[in-house]
Amino acid sequence: MSSLLKALLVGATLAFGGIAAQAAESDKVVLTVSGKVTNGEAVDFTLAELEALGTSSITTSSPWETNAITYEGVPMVTLMQVVGATGDKTAIVALNKYRTEVPVSDFADHGVILASRKNGEPMPISDKGPLFVVYPFDGKPELNTEIYHSRSAWQVRSIIIE
């Protein structure tokens, strides 16, 4: 077998493996919403399912970044509508068990998103991913306080409607 043919076969195998890995990753549940939801049962979402709900973007600086970043993700108002949230507050829990309470009213009042992309790229766990609660800090300077910073949870894994 020629070295060119071997190289093409190896390249095709690696490309297919990469596609298969991406497909498996897109089928992975990244968020569970539970509590006071329409049917009373937890709702699981993959990243693809979340993004299919429609996305918005916020370009903002934050205490954790030196420059303004463009974040894209599902508006939290949309997510609450989709699951039929009936509570007035949420408990947002991160992969590392960090927990913060966020009033549901924040979502409409401030245009909060559950970001899944940072500057157009999916966010890895090592960089606040896969999901990050983002407030428009630059658009609303009154949000640059410790209370709103504490509500901006990253590595979000679950949301409990209370």
Image: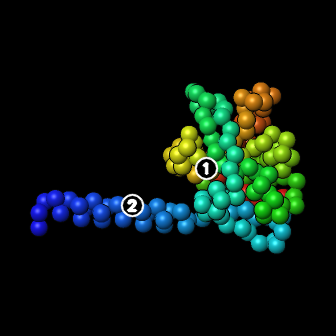
Say if 120 sits above or below 49 in the image. Answer: above
Q: Between 12 and 40, which is closer to the camera in this rendering? A: 12
Q: Is residue 103 left or right of residue 149?
A: right
- Name the spot of residue 102 as percent of width and height, x first: 79, 47
- Of helix, strand and loop, which one carries label 1? strand
Which amino acid is tagged 2?
Answer: Gly
| Circle 1 residues within 10 Å: few <14, some 14–19, many ≥20 | many
Q: Which mark is residue 116?
A: 1
Of the numbered discs 1 and 2, the one sitting upstream in the chain is 2
Q: Quadrant of the N terminus?
A: bottom left
User: Label 2: which residue?
Assistant: 18
x 69%, y 46%: residue: 56
> The C terminus appears in which quarter of the rendering?
bottom right
Rendering quarter of residue 141: top right
For residue 123, side relative to residue 98 (left or right): left
Q: Are marks 1 and 2 in contact (CB under 8 Å)?
A: no
Query: Relative to 89, is 53 on the left or the right?
Result: left
Q: Is residue 29 visible?
A: yes
Disc 2 secondary structure class: helix
> Which numbered dot is residue 143?
none
How many numbered marks have been drawn onto this rendered protein structure? Answer: 2
Amino acid type, callout 1: Ser
Give residue 142's position: percent from left, percent from top: 81, 28
Where residue 140 appears, as percent x and y from the top left, is 78, 30
Q: Mark 1 and mark 2: span between their CA atoms?
A: 20 Å
Disc 2 crowd rating (10 Å Cα; few below 14, some 14-19, many 20+) is few
Relative height, residue 17 to residue 97 (above, below): below
- Taking the spot 83% from the left edge, 64% from the top edge, the residue there is 84
Task: Work out whether residue 98 or residue 4 is closer to the camera in this orientation and state it.
Answer: 4
* Residue that appears at 64% across and 30% down: 61
Quarter assignment of residue 149: top right
Residue under the image location 78 percent in, 36 percent down? 147
